[in-house]
């Protein structure tokens, strides 16, 4: 019941970050894809590039691509241009907005463009934020075509990342034409960048982006045991955009022996960091899934852990001890579980702390694939402390081979305390509140036995 509640709250909390793929269903693709072309018409586009000027070649390639897109009703295209206004104007303009069946308008505008002035691609990209209609069911893509990025445009990667973080744009592409010297290298950039020194691959590059924009990648996931076979389990999974680190998809991985493995539909434009919420979590970074069917197999053999007390009756109520689990020799807590509860863990070595008084530390406990690790801990006893109606302060210590270990402090407001302790040898140090000299301090040594009560009186 607790696990089911966790999963429900988990999916509610993360559902806003991306589509949720329900068990036995494939996530639906966006209703529409919108592609904003940001086209460079600065003065340098008059320069010759192999067979013709850069602007003439770009016009020919774009017109050819638009012809092929007219038969795809789920794609809308808009055009923003920079550098075509007068030389004194450092601005870009949305020349053809998004609308259905606007291909003739796009083609007419592209044919008449004349490079004239100068403005940066980064500035035009910033202006593109409001070019997309408000639509939660569409995927938005930006395609920048330019013959160079200046040193001042080093922030274009940051601008593209902010557009993705805002949820406006799924991906930004830059197609750079001409000399590679005109394009600074940013390996960490969230932009998908293609530099074309020759005109031959120009059409194929744009056509690939246009055709891919309406496609999805199908993905099946399999968590495998030590024999490389899927095992029956339910595990929350989150796909993060590897550049923005925002959740794009959340799903509950499910596999049952009588059920087919789930299929998730993801965007092939995005690289993903993926977290499988096994215990401990499995994290994969910078994974890309191509158009078509993909299969992701993860080696995740699991065993189970249960800790329980000796099966004896006690005359006193038992505390609800918490069990804290860490990977062996690591400080990060990966799980907390109550006593007598069984929980699955990836196979490996673990350190376990039972938060009793004093705590019990179990080190290098091995959990094996497909096996149950069942550990029994001693049943505690109880200290019945009588302070003889004298308000007192003090502490209890466990007697260890290397000295006294502090266990707990006493309650100065209580004259009689009942404290549940693990079996062992103890020492109590006590001083009345109305006295301050060390000669007033009293001590007592006592033994706690399993399931028994031990009385200590300071009469």
Image (spheres, helix red, strand yellow):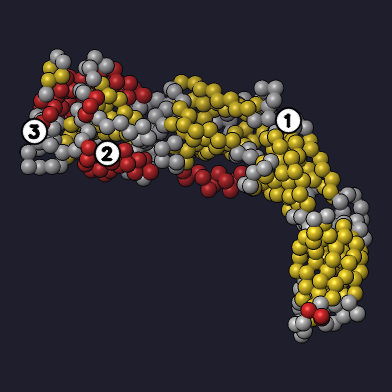
Find residue 89 and name its label.
none
Q: Position of residue 147 (x, y in %)?
A: 19, 28
Q: Nearer the viewer, residue 12 or 301?
A: 301
Q: Circle 2 — which element?
A: helix
Nearer-N-terminus badge (3/1): 3
Q: Nearer the viewer, residue 179 or 159?
A: 179
Find residue 369 and name its label.
1
Q: CA distance from mark 3 to mark 2?
A: 23 Å
Look at mark 3 in the image and give the residue it sits on. Answer: 116
Name the outermost residue toward the bottom: 434
At x 41%, y 37%, the residue is 243
Nearer-N-terminus badge (1/2): 2
Q: Residues at badges 1 and 2 in contact (C-beta under 8 Å)?
A: no
Locate residue 88: give its quadrant.
top left
Q: Residues within 10 Å of mark 2 (few under 14, many from 20)?
A: some
Q: Residues at badges 3 and 2 in contact (C-beta under 8 Å)?
A: no
Q: Nearer the viewer, residue 351 or 244?
A: 351
Q: Nearer the viewer, residue 71 or 424?
A: 424
* Image side of residue 117 versus residue 79, left or right: left
* Image side of residue 87 versus residue 198, left or right: left
Decide: is 263 above or below 151: above
Q: Circle 3 — which element?
A: loop
Q: CA distance from mark 1 to mark 2?
A: 50 Å
At x 21%, y 20%, the residue is 61
Find residue 154 and name its label.
2
Q: Residues within 10 Å of mark 1 (few under 14, many from 20)?
A: some
Decide: is 399 above or below 219: below
At x 32%, y 41%, the residue is 158
At x 57%, y 27%, the residue is 221
């Amino acid at each position: 019941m607790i696990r089911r509640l966790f999963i429900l709250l988990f999916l509610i909390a993360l559902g806003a970050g991306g589509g949720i793929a329900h068990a036995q269903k494939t996530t639906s693709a966006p209703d529409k894809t919108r592609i904003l072309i940001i086209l460079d018409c600065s003065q340098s586009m008059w320069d010759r590039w192999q067979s013709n000027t850069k602007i003439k070649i770009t016009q020919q390639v774009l017109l050819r691509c638009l012809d092929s897109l007219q038969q795809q009703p789920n794609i809308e295209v808009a055009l923003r241009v920079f550098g075509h206004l007068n030389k004194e104007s450092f601005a870009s303009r949305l020349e053809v907005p998004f609308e259905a069946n606007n291909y003739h308008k796009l083609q007419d505008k592209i044919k008449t463009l004349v490079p004239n002035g100068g403005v940066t691609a980064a500035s035009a990209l910033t202006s593109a934020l409001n070019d997309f209609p408000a639509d939660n069911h569409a995927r938005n893509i930006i395609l920048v075509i330019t013959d160079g990025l200046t040193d001042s445009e080093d922030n274009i990667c940051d601008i593209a990342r902010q557009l993705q973080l805002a949820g406006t744009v799924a991906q930004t592409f830059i197609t750079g034409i001409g000399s590679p010297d005109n394009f600074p290298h940013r390996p960490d950039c969230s932009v998908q960048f293609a530099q074309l020194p020759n005109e031959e691959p120009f059409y194929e590059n744009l056509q690939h982006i246009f055709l891919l924009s309406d496609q999805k990648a199908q993905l099946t996931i399999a968590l495998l045991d030590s024999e490389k076979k899927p095992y029956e389990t339910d595990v929350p999974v989150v796909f993060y955009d590897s550049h923005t680190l925002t959740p794009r998809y959340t799903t509950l991985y499910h596999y049952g022996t009588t059920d087919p493995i789930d299929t998730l539909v993801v965007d092939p434009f995005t690289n993903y960091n993926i977290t499988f919420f096994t215990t401990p979590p499995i994290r994969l970074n910078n994974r890309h899934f191509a158009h078509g069917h993909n299969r992701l197999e993860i080696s995740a053999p699991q065993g189970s852990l249960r800790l329980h007390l000796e099966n004896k009756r006690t005359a006193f109520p038992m505390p609800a001890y918490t069990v804290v689990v860490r990977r062996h020799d690591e400080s990060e807590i990966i799980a907390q579980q109550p006593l007598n509860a069984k929980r699955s863990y990836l196979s490996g070595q673990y350190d376990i702390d039972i938060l009793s008084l004093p705590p019990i530390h179990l080190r290098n406990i091995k959990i094996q694939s497909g096996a149950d690790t069942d550990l029994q801990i001693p049943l505690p006893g109880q200290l019945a402390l009588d302070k003889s109606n004298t308000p007192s302060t003090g502490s209890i210590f466990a007697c260890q081979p290397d000295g006294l270990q502090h266990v707990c402090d006493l309650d100065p407001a209580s004259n009689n305390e009942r404290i549940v302790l693990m079996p062992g040898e103890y020492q109590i140090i006590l001083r009345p509140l109305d006295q301050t000299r060390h000669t007033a301090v009293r001590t007592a040594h006592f033994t706690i036995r399993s399931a028994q009560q031990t009385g200590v009186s300071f009469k």
